[in-house]
Amino acid sequence: MSDDNKDTAGRPGPRERVIGTPSPAREKALLAEDDISAPAGVGDQLDEASAKRAERIVATLFLVAFAASVAFIAYFIGWSGRDGGMHGVSRARESNLWLGGLMALSFLALAFGVTIWVRRLMTSKPIVQERHELAADEETRAAFTEDFLEGADDSGITKRPLLRRTLLLAAAPLGLAPLVLLRDLGPLPEKRLRHTYWGEAVKKAQAEGKKGARLVVDGTNKPLRVSDFSSPGSMITVLPEGIEEELPEDQVLTQNAKAVTILINIPADQFKPAKGRENWHVNGIVAYSKVCTHVGCPAALYEQTTHHILCPCHQSTFDATDAAKVIFGPAARSLPQLPLSVEDGYLIATSDYHEPVGPSFWERG
Amino acid sequence: MSEATAPKAVEAPLTFLDDRLGSTTFFKRNMKKVFPDHWSFMLGEIALYSFIILLLTGTFLTLWFQPSMTETVYNGSYTKLQGVKMSEAYASTLHITFDVRGGLLMRQIHHWAAILFMASILAHMLRVFFTGAYRKPRELNWLIGIGMFTLGMLEGLFGYSLPDDLLSGTGLRITQGVAESIPVVGTYIYMFLFGGEFPGQDIVPRLYMLHILLIPGLLLGMVTAHMMIMWVQKHTAMPVKNQSEQQVYGYPFYPVFMAKTGAYFLFTFGVLALLGAFAQINPIWLFGPYDPGAISSGSQPDWYMGVLEGALRIMPNWEVSAWGHTVSFNVLIPALVPLGIVFGGAAAWPFVEQWVTGDKRHHHVNERPRNAPVRTATGIAAVTFYGLLWVAGANDVIADKFHVSLFATTWFFRVAFFLGPIVAFIVTKRICLGLQRKDADVIGHGVEAGVIMMSPDGKFSERHEAPREEERHVLLSKENTRPEAPARDAKGIPAPGTKGPIGHLRSRLNRAWTFDDIPVEEHPHGEQAEIEGGATSHEVRH
């Protein structure tokens, strides 16, 4: 490596030093070596002895790469596939380390080998090339223009405006074709974003003569009794009854994504029911949409001491005691509230959300 | 020498090609193409090689991945999720991870390569910006570069959305919210993108097609154009000795550059393999399948989406509802404005600079960042702007690790977002001018030798020495500028272009660009001799 730095040799060395003064700085370079010259290769002449040494090093590295590649193949066939292939976490981890490590070793040994080859063994002279003018000369440009105009003339497009205009006219609808063809990408929004499965569930329940739809716990799908949810400060995720069983399989997640609701038990002394929603809660148990009104992440973090609901994506914060009003962050609207009641000891929703859940949109109003 | 014949294995295919394509003319002309050398010229190469590695590993992954959202019950070898309902996309990703030999490795290399791809493009673009390498005639390649970075963001977002795990589903949910915020057509875009309501059954197959066909195809075309333009225009060079606007100095493509760049591909692949083997990334099996009601705290996108995430987080909650319509500025502004400023500004910059400086010449030799203080300061201001938003995307992590209030971090970024770039601009410009002053001093008076001399009458002075030839060349690469005199014709009437508000704006900007430039130039006589002989007049003032 040291023989790459020959270009410092011609510089004046430290001069005689006056006693009592600091020694002259040994390296007075103003710029990093990179900014000055670009040493690549060994230059014109090869020093045979050091070249021999470099050759041995490079060959060793190439042999290492070869050995690593062979080991990679051997491991792949022999070990990672033993007992009929990979199964499970520990085997995946083991095989990842061996395969990745050997692959890295193989590539890096090759890379270092080639690099040392270039830097220690390749004779190379820096060369100079002219940068040619990029633009064509005036004559060529003029000749081109002439040919171009002549071609346009020959084609008649300049002389026959009728042809030109009808051609453009014919092309215009073709340009719109992709837009038309993409129409069936999805349904029109219509009123889809305005209601959730709660509405359907409530309607169904009322058709059976009940007051409303039961709340089932997300995960277990068990209806929730008021007595099961009586400790103040707790929070649980609920869904409308029947969402899992009555919907076609491909609809479940989509309906779930709108209907998902958080149920919070707020101590009675801290709860401030909003105007017009005085009977939407059951002894301080309130239900809010879990879909953040900012961009739709689940507002899933609930802090028992402050009764704040926090969305972990962008930190919009809502006050559970006060109609889930926004108290911090980028969300602009409160989480919609679901009217609750009790029937036969079970918590029920008496209607759908009264406003669209989730992020705002143009037609929302 | 002319008697030399190539080995048959080379000669035969070359002759075959030449007989049919006349390709030898091309090879002859380009084999010895000169590539100037500088470490920073390698940054773009990392991006190129990452892209190739992405194509290779991505092809591997497509052999097993099922782009389907049909529900299935997992019964593969990962015991913790056995019996769990999930989409086929997630199940097949688990299959690749745990049941395909080398599958986890390919997944991890693919993801790391995507991260490296974007990071190296950004680093490369910063190098190009700060050295002025985007100047005429290279504006087209600059625009292609911005296009590739933007497409890379989409490609990455779509890619990490495919496994349909909890984190990727959350990313798509945010995409839905952003789509909905677009005025007038937002809900239509949302419905057409997802084929109905979120998440539906269509989004993964659609993103898959975009991720493996359309966007990589566009990127490949742009990469090709980028390389061909670079080849035709020849690479820029650093302003060092032997480089000039007329000539390029360096090492030939064959064999030196070819071997070096080949080694560089191997280095890139080797390092990515190391990362894939030893650094876990996106462990989707820990996140679980997507469930719209679930989320984990500290959900973070890949780094290149962080800037959008940060913008969404620090935006105040402005929303307007009037005449039955709602516009959510709290989503719309952060989604469009910051990146619009950065990418739009970057795209317009070469042309704005030309207009302001009036410099329509070709530039093949790069400029040192200090010698264009306004450009460098603007660049650092943009870096600060982008960087602050990017870090703001991790404000919950910052609040957690440093035990500060989450709300305080939000407010910090809301303020810093406006002040940071301004401070960065001012400080950077002063540093540039200070460095110009230092260069002027070195050229004018030489370098401090560290040798203190005592004159016969007892005065102490420090000897100054002339800088080395190579250093002088670099320092003198600076083009000194002055504000333009207003263009007037012989009768003293201002040229039409200088009149009107636009003309005045241009003269003002031109003045701002140039007025405090510090000339770095050799003094024709006197001081030069002084340096050679060891200075006598420079007293030690410290």
Image (spheres, coloured by chain):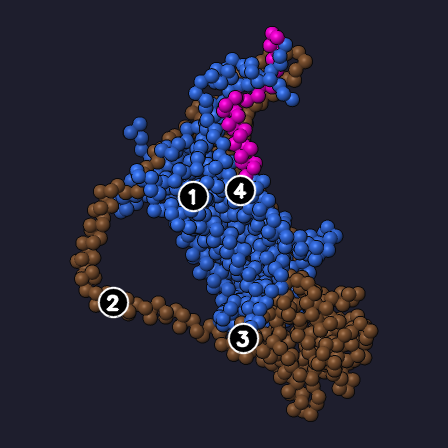
Classify 10 Å Cα crowding around label 2: few (below 14), some (14-19), many (20 and above).
few
Secondary structure of the residue carrying numbered label 4: helix
Q: CA distance from mark 3 to mark 4?
A: 45 Å
Look at mark 1 in the image and give the residue it sits on: B507
Q: Is any part of residue A257 visible from this angle?
A: yes
Residue occupying image coordinates x 69% and y 74%:
A288
Q: Chain of mark 3?
A: B
Q: Is residue A136 left or right of residue B62?
A: left
Residue occupying image coordinates x 70% and y 90%:
A210
Task: Name the tint of chain A in the rendering.
Answer: brown
Does residue A10 sit above or below A294 in this rendering? above
Task: Name the tint of chain B in the rendering.
Answer: blue
Q: Chain of mark 4?
A: B
Q: Is residue A147 left or right of residue B360?
A: left
Secondary structure of the residue carrying numbered label 2: helix
Look at mark 4 in the image and give the residue it sits on: B377
